[in-house]
Amino acid sequence: MIKDLEVVALTRPVPEYGLVAGDVGTVVMVYDGGKGFTVEFMTVKGKTIAIVTLESDAIRPVEDREIANARQVA
């Protein structure tokens, strides 16, 4: 189960915030036993891009053998 402060990746884009599948964020709130989450997405330098509330199927835990990738955001 995904918990507060866990690092997660998007499973689908969230275009209204300029986010794409695979973008990485940190869970800041868990709702209704894990049915929903508020996730903060930041630049690699720590500037918040978006704080988004998502359903559980929109995120997944980050695995140990994954690598982060940098990209420009609008």
Image (cartoon, rainbow, N blue to C red):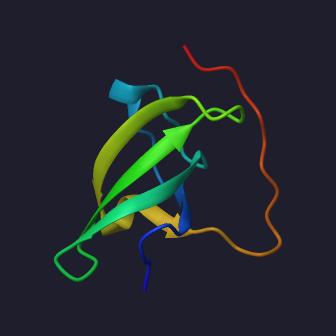
Using the image, determine if residue 61 lies above or below residue 38: below
Instruction: Name the foreground residue: 61 vs 47.
Output: 47
**Outermost residue toward the front in this view:** 46
| Number of numbered markers | 0
Q: Position of residue 58 (x, y in %)?
A: 38, 58
User: Is 40 on the left or on the right of 7, as rendered?
Assistant: left
Using the image, determine if residue 38 lies above or below residue 73: below
User: Is 69 on the left or on the right of 1, as rendered?
Assistant: right
Instruction: Name the foreground residue: 59 vs 52.
Output: 52
Query: Residue visible at 68% across and 20% down?
Result: 72
Query: Residue visible at 56% across and 37% down?
Result: 42
Identify the image quadrant of the N terminus: bottom left
User: Is 27 on the left or on the right of 52, as rendered?
Assistant: right
Q: Quadrant of residue 59?
A: bottom left
Identify the image quadrant of the C terminus: top right
Using the image, determine if residue 36 lies above or below residue 49: below
User: Is 8 on the left or on the right of 71, as rendered?
Assistant: left
Query: Residue visible at 49% across and 67% down?
Result: 5
Instruction: Name the foreground residue: 31 vs 73.
Output: 31
Query: Residue visible at 63% across and 32% down?
Result: 43
Q: Quadrant of residue 4?
A: bottom left
Q: Position of residue 14 (x, y in %)?
A: 39, 37
Q: Position of residue 29 (x, y in %)?
A: 31, 63
Q: Position of residue 55 (x, y in %)?
A: 27, 61
